[in-house]
Image: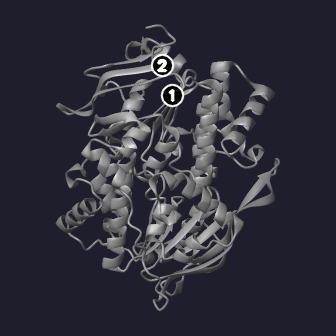
């Protein structure tokens, strides 16, 4: 087979095992697939099915020697990558094959600016520096939808929103226009309008350069839109593969049929106009100063939250939607007094805005949060059991060790995790499983108010539906109040009683969720919904009607 007709990437009989103690566990079990030149192959499946492990094997990015390959080969342009020494595989990484990781905050260097991190790739592989490098960096940031990219060159990762960090990762991966791009959940943290931009960008680059794409995702709507071939993984095996339309219209394997049928049920919590207000604020502001010069004088402000007013009643779910960087997460953090803000914050009838840390502690048990990035939010030095039990140790010290353990076991079981895994550490779990741990840590305290910051973004379709059902069941059983922050309007529609739409730190539209989805009033809201429903059209999203 000559270089033109042979596949660009040929994975044959690949197995991956991880050593632990005296034994080993198999994460990938005799997997085979190939990617032709200019072709897009999608790997789909539930969290922990082996998708990311298969992808990381291609660039030998697994934790060797803990990870081993009992069988298989990975041939790229005829070379077996598994047999290459480190110095040779290093020349391929970032140049011939690039990868977009699922969790940008753990992949970006917190000590380097955005310009330095993208510039490093251009310098190492292309020798580009100075004004030419800066022009290319600005071009990349513009392509991936970073607004006013000149102002972001000197920013550090922690100064960007989750979606903006993911865009920077995509820009880094595309910098050298690789032959093969591995995209591991590249649109997970992005709002629907930017998802559409990124998918269009990837399609344009594929058409212009002939780049091949290995696309790992749990979003079946995106798979149908972008992929040529789909491989469905379950428990480390590929259970079904074929052209996208064939697999979607006539799935053969029971697991594929279950995956395609998984949808959150549209059964939002009803509005509670007579219920007491749990959380409210009026004209809330979170402004971050922009400092310049040798004396670091304040020359302006980034108005992350700019005059927001809201009230959430007992038993309701407030949905907060908007583009990445619109202020959604900042609003949630401000309401929980996790960042400084101006304006009253009334929780359970008491203004908590001016309280010191010690005075706030009695309220902490009743207000919890599930963060967007579970890997950054979970201590790598604590076992899962200790992470979930930590809040109980602080807020419910009267519980005995057995009682705490029982609460931890129940919380893990409630979110679909095997309680027997509670002695393991966060790095031993997939991204979706880590998000389940975050949810368990929040609900174990049985709080009154929970801020859910993109809780389903890292989850596969099956567990999205399960988590939505779980949140709804917990809400009804315990009369919980949620603030649900998300760019996934399908999930928001299934949970939200009331909806606010944010843009540039302001609320551009609000009202009962059912009314707003049917009759959006502003051009921005209509554009946001239109982008979402175009992405969901392949799946027949009920809210599109």
In the image, residue 332 lies at what x, y percent? 55, 67
| Callout 1 touching callout 2 (CB < 8 Å) | yes
Q: Nearer the viewer, mark 1 or mark 2?
A: 1
Label 2 crowding class (10 Å Cα cut-off): few <14, some 14-19, many 20+?
Answer: many
Q: Image quarter for residue 265?
A: bottom left
The residue indicated by pointer 2 is 8
Residue under the point 35% across and 56% down? 262
Identify the residue position indicated by label 1 in the image: 39
Query: Is 209 situated above or below 248?
Result: above
Could you tell whether 61 is left or right of 329 in the image? left
Question: Horizontal placement of 472 versus 524: left or right?
Answer: left
| Circle on res. 364 | none
* Coordinates of residue 461 in the picture (x, y in percent): 38, 53
Q: What is the C-alpha distance between the residues marked 1 and 2?
A: 9 Å
Q: Is residue 196 above or below residue 107?
A: below
Could you tell me which quadrant the N terminus lies in? top left
**Which callout, 1 or 2, points at the residue further toward the start of the chain?**
2
In the rendered image, the residue lying farthest to the bottom is: 274
């Amino acid at each position: 087979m000559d270089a033109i007709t042979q596949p660009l990437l040929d994975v044959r009989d690949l197995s991956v095992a991880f050593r632990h103690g005296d034994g080993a566990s198999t994460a990938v079990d005799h997997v085979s697939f190939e990617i032709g030149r200019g072709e897009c192959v999608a790997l789909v499946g539930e969290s922990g099915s082996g998708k990311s492990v298969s992808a990381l094997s291609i660039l030998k990015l697994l934790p060797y020697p803990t990870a081993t390959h009992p069988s298989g080969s990975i041939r790229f342009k005829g070379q077996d990558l598994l047999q290459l020494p480190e110095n040779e595989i290093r020349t391929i990484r970032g140049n011939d094959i690039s990868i977009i990781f699922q969790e940008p905050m753990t992949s970006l260097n917190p000590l380097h600016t955005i310009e330095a991190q993208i510039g490093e790739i251009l310098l190492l592989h292309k020798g580009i520096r100075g004004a030419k490098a800066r022009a290319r960096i600005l071009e990349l940031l513009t392509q991936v939808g970073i607004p006013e990219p000149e102002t972001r060159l000197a920013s550090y990762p922690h100064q960007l929103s989750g979606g903006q960090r993911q865009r920077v990762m995509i820009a880094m991966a595309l910098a050298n226009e690789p032959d093969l791009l591995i995209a591991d959940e590249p649109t997970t943290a992005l709002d629907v309008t930017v998802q559409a931009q990124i998918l269009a960008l990837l399609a344009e680059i594929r058409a212009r350069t002939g780049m091949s794409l290995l696309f790992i995702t749990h979003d079946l709507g995106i798979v149908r839109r972008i992929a040529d071939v789909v491989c469905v993984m379950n428990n480390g095996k590929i259970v079904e593969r074929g052209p996208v339309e064939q697999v979607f219209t006539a799935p053969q394997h029971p697991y594929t049929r279950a995956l395609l049928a998984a949808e959150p049920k549209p059964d939002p919590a009803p509005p509670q106009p007579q219920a007491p207000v749990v959380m409210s604020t009026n004209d809330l502001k979170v402004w971050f100063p922009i400092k310049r010069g040798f004396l670091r004088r304040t020359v302006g402000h980034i108005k992350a939250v700019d005059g927001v007013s809201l009230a959430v009643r007992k038993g309701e779910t407030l949905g907060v939607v908007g583009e990445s960087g619109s202020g959604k997460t900042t609003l949630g953090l401000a309401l929980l007094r996790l960042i400084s803000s101006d304006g009253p914050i009334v929780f359970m009838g008491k203004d908590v805005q001016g309280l010191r840390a010690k005075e706030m502690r009695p309220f902490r048990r009743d207000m919890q949060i599930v963060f967007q990035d579970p890997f950054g939010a979970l201590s790598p030095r604590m076992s899962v059991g200790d992470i979930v039990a930590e809040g109980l140790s602080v807020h419910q010290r009267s519980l005995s060790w057995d009682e705490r353990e029982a609460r931890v076991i129940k919380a893990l079981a409630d979110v679909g995790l095997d309680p027997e895994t509670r002695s393991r550490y966060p790095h031993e779990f997939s991204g979706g499983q880590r998000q389940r741990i975050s949810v368990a840590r929040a609900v174990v305290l049985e709080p009154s108010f929970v801020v859910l910051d993109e809780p389903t973004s890292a989850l596969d379709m099956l567990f999205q539906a399960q988590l939505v059902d779980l949140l709804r069941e917990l809400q009804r059983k315990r009369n919980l109040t949620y603030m649900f922050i998300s760019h996934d309007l399908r999930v928001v529609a299934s949970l939200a009683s009331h909806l606010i739409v944010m843009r540039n730190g302001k609320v551009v539209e609000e009202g009962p969720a059912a009314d707003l989805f049917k009759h959006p009033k502003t051009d921005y809201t209509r554009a946001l919904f239109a982008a979402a429903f175009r992405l969901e059209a392949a799946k027949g999203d009920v809210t599109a009607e």
